[in-house]
Amino acid sequence: MKHRDIVDEMTLEEKAAFLSGANEWQSREIKRLHIPAIACSDGPHGIRRQAGAGDHLGLNESLPATCFPTAATVANSWDEELGNEIGEALGEEAASQEVDVLLGPGLNMKRSPLCGRNFEYFSEDPYLGGKMAAAYIRGIQSRGIYACPKHFAVNSQELRRMAMNSVLDERTLREIYLTGFEIAVKEGKAKAIMSSYNEVNGTYANENRHLLQDILRKDWGFDGIVITDWGASNDHVKGVEAGSNLEMPVPGFDSAREILKAVEKKQLTMEELDLCVDELLDAVLDLTSKREERKKKKISQSFSESEHHRLAKKAAIKSAVLLKNEEHILPLKKKTKVALIGDFAMEPRYQGAGSSVVNATFVETMDKIIVNYDLQVVGISRGYRRDGKEDSSLEKVTLELAKNADVVLYCFGLDELSESEGLDRTHMRIPQNQVALLEALARVNENIVGIISAGSAIEMPWQRSCKAILHGYLYGQAGASAMMELLMGNENPSGRLSESYPFKYEDTPAYRYFPATERNSEYREAQYIGYRYYDSSKVRVQYPFGFGLSYTEFSYSDLKISKNGVKVIIQNTGKYDGEEVVQLYVGLPDAVVFRPEKELKGFKKVFIKAGERKEIEIPFDDKTFRYWNVKTDRWEIESGNYQIMIGASVSDIRLSGNLAVEGTTEQYPYDPEKMPHYYTGIVQNIEEQEFEELLGYPVPSGKWTGELGLNDAICQMYYAKSGLARFIYCRLTAMKQKSEAAGKPDLNILFIYNMPFRALAKMTGGMVSMQMAEGMVTVVNGHFWKGMKRIIGGFFRNRKANKEYMKLLSK
Ligand code: BGC
């Protein structure tokens, strides 16, 4: 213990209260001992510091801050240096707004393109995601702020996110869903981590000793604090036992009283409690001294808005992916007659909805920016309606405009409702009215340059209508000028996709398993996520992982493989200076232990002037050959002749060679005859028996039967016994549908809809106790009077107990 002296001075009540939040964003201060509060704030791509009313859904306004491109966007840059720079800027802005812990970056794996928060996450590949996250974390923490990578772990679905159970085998957990976090912790040295809402194999992430103790603290040597996601604490005592330090946001004193009871009953030992308090105390004191130091050194209390805006622009430039460029229509020639079309040109989609929403300092728009470039703009039109409705008169004017232009710049993509915290998409299409307009435009003008805004993979059956496609993702506040620089050729596109673009949703590996319909989300596709699936099972995709065009070309030669890594010569053979992303993939043909055909094990982004060549070195590391062996319960290496591949994307391997590697064990975990599909990678239809073979135990039942419990979501009230509960469910559903029809997600409704009853006690600042929440469940289950008695009795008991606790703390 680092602060024995202070911990010993704390009363039991102070210790218990210290471990949960005082309000929406702050930890509790203990005045008597001069222990201050620390302040948390979202988020991953900009600071969302709320000065007024706090909420965790991005509803109320926050202080102005730079809105950088979202994680899904910056991941396409494959540029760790850039991630580091963004992290530094985030750290500076956090410091200037007196934020101590920044709730990001988000690095859940993109198991399905439909997850509503994919725009906040880096990649479908844990290595790329982990490296980018580590870079952000290093940058943020270099400014004396703690980064808090989230959501730990296996939180790849928004539907009923607080009440679902991710069921997966240990190997998939380690190799796919945890490796990114491992890199974030070991290489980024994250000082905080956020436990996710869901259960992992039947235990809430926040109470999961396997995750929080065995893996996070013991295996990875994490020495920071675990903070719950907002409302992710189920049983605070179990959380503390597992080593979760701070329950957020505001459970009042109910959670603290649970701790007191548990200590009294010897369910929780004083050592366990003290350890948890000591870790949090260490963070609080460290962050406070960092704050003091900043004050003493007079490190600026403000940040340069213009400098950070420039960085946001640079990030958007380096992250945009040129997907198509027929007849070298791009870069645009000077003085080209262009028509700028699309609602997104006036009201850009530059970030997603939810807790990550940033109140940007300044948002550029294409319609205003375009005049700064040497083009002849023949006109600008919204083209389509944002609400998805057809508008024939608008279409008519737009087509007339397109006829008069040499090139149409068409800005389109996913609408607001598609990308939000709290909901998953139901398909991968963009709104039909945008597609209809594109096709109509293509009939009157064959030179269409599509500029897409979308934070996640989409289907592109319409891509033939575009001669060029520049994918800006969710490009942040300076995205408009970033797109213009690229279109004009002042900058050369260098982004490469950090996720695969399948032809259609039905092609995706988790298509039959996502999202969980009842309680369990079964990860039957195992490690065949994203390109690991398409590549292994030979499913063709629209655009593969790692893909992106440039205005120049690169040749690859002279691959040298040694036991420490690879060296390769890259030459820029075109006319433009540019950056290439050199990707290292490793595979083991005829492996005894099944594995994807190839996996990303290293990468380097490199700038090369036209005509020049450079030698690139990519070292191997501890992850290059390892796999998790469920028999020996540790990382092992299979011996064999590994294929070492260097590519410009997963489907464009330019050079390859072999390396014989010695193995670490002959104890192999699987019986290939019992798991044929895992050996072929054709995993879309795994039967229960084969999944159980992989899991090593029977698939737990996820069926909803019997009465509703504290952990069931409010939206499950549709089969409640109480007529009143069913009525409330119908009202909520109607409100949700209304907001969907209006084209804007209502985050409040979505949150309530997916929230379990227990969260009522965890997020209401002490108004509702767990006993009252239990009473509500009793009412829902049809025992009206019994439930009301508990609610009313609980209300008075809770009020009295809160007052007493408050008195004890203020002594
Ligand atoms: C989100 C977190 C976020 C927190 C605080 C939760 O709803 O899942 O990512 O950091 O709210 O806003």
Image (spheres, grey):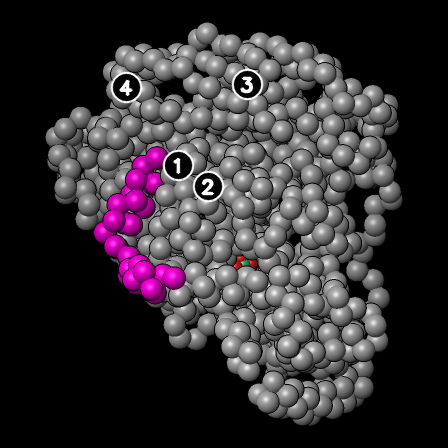
User: In this rendering, does residue 418 appear at all?
Assistant: no
Q: Which of marks 4 and 1 is nearer the N terminus?
A: 1
* Residue on which the image places disc 1: 81
Query: Disc 3 to disc 4, how far (Cα)?
Result: 25 Å
Residue 75 picture quarter: top left
Q: Cβ(mark 4) to ligand 1 < 8 Å?
A: no
User: In this rendering, does residue 571 appear at all?
Assistant: yes
Seen at 38% across and 39% down, the residue is 82
Q: Which of marks 2 and 4 is nearer the N terminus?
A: 2
Query: Disc 3 to disc 1, how far (Cα)?
Result: 21 Å
Query: Disc 4 to disc 1, how far (Cα)?
Result: 19 Å
* Residue on which the image places disc 2: 135
Q: Which amino acid does label 2 sit on?
A: Ala
- Classify residue 148 as left or right of residue 605: right
* Residue on which the image places disc 4: 609
- Name the mark on residue 565: 3
Q: Position of residue 463 (x, y in %)?
A: 41, 30
Q: Cβ(mark 3) to ligand 1 < 8 Å?
A: no
Residue 256 picture quarter: bottom right
